[in-house]
Amino acid sequence: MRSSCFWACWPLPIMSSESRKAFPFTQFEPLWQQRWDEACAHRTPNPGDADFDPSRPKFFVLDMFPYPSGQGLHVGHPEGYTATDIIGRYKRMRGFNVLHPMGWDAFGLPAEQYAIKTGTHPRQTTERNIANFKQQLRSLGFAYDWQREINTTDPGYFRWTQWIFLQLYNSYVNSEGRARPIAELEAQGVSRDELDARRLAYVSEAPVNWCPALGTVLANEEVIDGKSEVGGHPVERRPMRQWMLRITAFAQRLMDELDGLDWPESIKLLQRNWIGRSEGAEVNFKLEHGGEVITVFTTRPDTLFGATYLVLAPEHPLVDGLVTEGQRPMVEQYRSNASRKSDLERTELAKEKTGVFTGAHAVNPVNGERIPIWVADYVLTGYGTGAIMAVPAHDQRDFEFAQVFGLAVRQVVQPPSGQEWRGFTGEGIAVNSGLLEGLPTAEAKSKIITWLQEQGLGRRTVNFKLRDWLFSRQRYWGEPFPIVWENGQHRALRETELPLLPPDLEDFKPTGTPEPPLSKAPEWVQYSATAKRELNTMPQWAGSCWYYLRYCDPRNDQRFVGEAAQDYWMGRGHGGVDLYVGGTEHAVLHLLYARFWHKVLFDLGHVTTPEPFQRLVNQGLILGEDGQKMSKSRGNVVNPDDVVKEYGADALRLYEMFMGPLEQVKPWSMKGVEGVYRFLARVWRLVMEADEQGEWRLSAALVDLAPPKDLNKVLHETIKKVGEDIERLSFNTAISQMMVCTNAFTAASQRSAPALACFLKLLSPFAPHLADELHSRLAAQFPGLCRELLIAQSWPEYDPTALIEDEIEIVFQVNGKLRDKARVPKDADKTQLETMALASARVQEFMEGKPVRKVIVVPGKLVNVVV
RNA sequence: GCCGAUGUGGUGAAAUGGUAAACACAGCGGACUUAAAAUCCGCUGGGAGGCAACUCCCUUGCCGGUUCGAGUCCGGCCAUCGGCACCA
């Protein structure tokens, strides 16, 4: 059915207004999607394949793969996906072997919660959601190689997630900070206990974030303001036996190796802040009675003379031993209160300092002074040594605490330029500080550290905020650990036992206790007569930590990725994924975890680059039409399916790129969609026109001739700008230029078919359906044109000579203000331009007879007369 | 509190230190039409002067600086958004 026959006859045939489209995208978009599939147009051969061409450079362009939720795609997905699709198609036309894959990060809580509510197995929900997502993505015409589709819940995939876990389990970090096989330690006869204590995947009994509502523990990165990132439920700390990954051993490298990456500085900074390196010193304080020593960490050892008390975290192991009998009841009370507080409560109460005196005293090593020891929850157990020396004069928190409890405040730093010293935390000159007297802060620090080291009272140290990664979850829908327990000890499954599938359960509910749901499958749990399986599962991040590697070789059942494929697609040195596009929300989660795993795999020789993602770009959030974040409750959510139905996939793609710079936050506008839709219709009508019956046919204005000079110039300007703008990811300006070009061609009475064919190549990465449709129609009529799919054709080169004009416009300024313009020959030299400018009546008028002080001539641009 | 990003027409925005506002949306006017839609053509930052073609002045959050010339570079403020937050 042709859709635009509305003026053909009266009365109109019965036809709803919806089906009257400005161009018949409803017909040709699905058609081209099918043709591309049939032609395997987006298949990417691997090294070793018959049709692989090793002479071409590679380009690996990656999207953050989606969690296939029940809601389907939202308009944020196609933003990044279209950007990578444009780059991928463009690079392909530029002669690159392009790897542009898609897959599913499909383990996760929503499928499990849905299962709890409805009894539907998460596998079914996941399959259904993936089918829906895939159909939606196909309808947008993305050039993914679907033969490389991966799914983190597929046993053929998570088999290798489990295998990588075993690499972590069987590795340690050596003195150079490199991951090495733990067999090296075993060969040295290291004891079993010490081996277990050094593994990169280890079991810990430490306090963890327990979320009762979700029935699981969470990583620090998943807890926001004391509440779970998913669902916003309160989280409390309790000691539990959990699997941890030793990411802290890589803290320094994760920080240093950011330097070589082409990432937004803001994301690097987020990671640096999260890793949170601080340099300082540990200082030993002897207890007044008994030989025990309290070690504190400080970044300001230069203020040691101002330390007027010590504070221990409530959980500090020395508290029990040093508290005096008189203070014990109060201290016990305080500690038990603190242990019951959730992180949220601790944060909310952060304004008010609380604490309790232990009754004990320590000795300041630098001046022998007797100072009280307190317990307070503003000192955290997990950071540094869990104990601090308090210098209330020069630390805000210590100052507040000292105010509440009336503790001594002693100045030891003189601020510059007569500022108030109480609460001054900046750098200054040491005062009241014995051997440091008169030294600026930096020198004082270094001198006192040297002194402490000589006396055996302390040492220089570095601390990180980054904690080890809590890696186990009490959930059903995740990768089971390839671990069994026997005689109270853990041990790895053999690689041949992978993949380890989860048991089939009917009841996925959390047990309400820290006992994981896998405990509900007793036959599965019982590995052998004497051994039981680990019941925890891995967190959702596990599958996404290495998926980009699997894309290189997704069907390999011998290795997690084949060596040749890995080597080719990831490259060496500053290689890795050439462009990774996704949202900022993963700045400290996925992006840090994946870098960590990659470094372990690199150290162990399994991958050839130290970093996974060489270039990262964050797409900006798309807001609702009201400028607010899209949400169901606000009712401002835009469904991409509706847009595709009304305006077509090409219009959606083009609009999302035309909205503004990729990285910027920007509001949706349906009017804007209509704008680009009208543009596409204009392009359509450059090639097509309606006959008397309203049927579309090739335009009679088409000619098999080169375009006239002015149009040729616009065309070549467009070739130049679109190419350059795609390279810079400046898609909005590339589209503007194509609009300029289209407007110029629309105004012409004759349409050069070769010029239009060239223009369609430029358009094809943005609006691939329309471009292929029109191009194929042109090629059918004009035998000089290549009949291949546009993606298989090569990107046009612009002709610099076509851009040159005989005459150019020169601006004449007086004192920097525009006063006149003139058209001059393109090769007019400086003196000619100067003469012309000074001769201009308008220039003379504004010179007001004043003498010329200086003339600036910028050839091809302007002349500025300074008077 | 600390860190980061962003401030340009009615709106989304564009501008290698060189004509601010390209391209688009909205608005206004015209052509076509019995009419409407669609399409095509034109106008559209603010102010002042002129019958007019036109001319002048002002304008990129605010203040200052560098420069022949600043939206762009430098310094200092202000506002909005985002992240982190008792990390010693």
Image (tube, coloured by chain):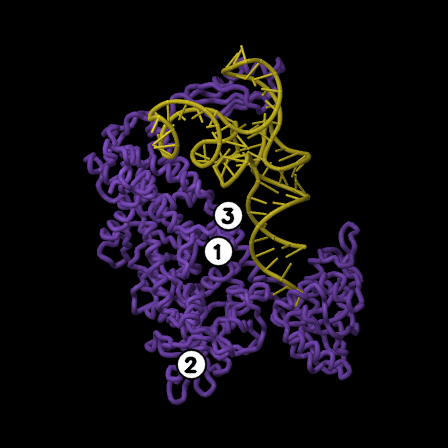
Chain colours: A purple, B yellow
- Chain of the residue under the numbered disc 2 shown in the image: A
- The residue that appears at 42% across and 75% down in the rendered structure is A508
Secondary element at tag 3: loop
Q: Amino acid at mark 1?
A: Lys
Q: Kindly identify which numbered label has been placed on residue A665.
A: 3
Sequence order check, earlier mark of 2 and 1? 2
Which residue is at 27% across, 30% downward?
A: A752
* Tag 2 secondary structure: helix
Q: Residue at x 67, y 76 (%)?
A: A337
* Tag 2 near tag 3, CB within 8 Å: no
Q: Given this view, does label 1 or label 3 mark the residue nearer the observer? A: 1
Quarter of the image with the N terminus of chain A in it: top left
Which residue matches tag 1? A632
Q: Nearer the viewer, residue A294 or A507?
A: A507
Q: Report crowding for label 3: few under 14, some 14 to 19, many 20 or more residues within 10 A (C-alpha).
A: some
Residues indicated by labels 2 and 1 sit on the same polypeptide chain: yes
User: What residue sits right under mark 2 in the picture?
Assistant: A520
Q: Secondary structure at mark 1?
A: loop
**Residue A565 screen position, x and y as percent:** 31, 60
Spot occupied by residue A214 in the image (x, y as percentages of width and height): 51, 71
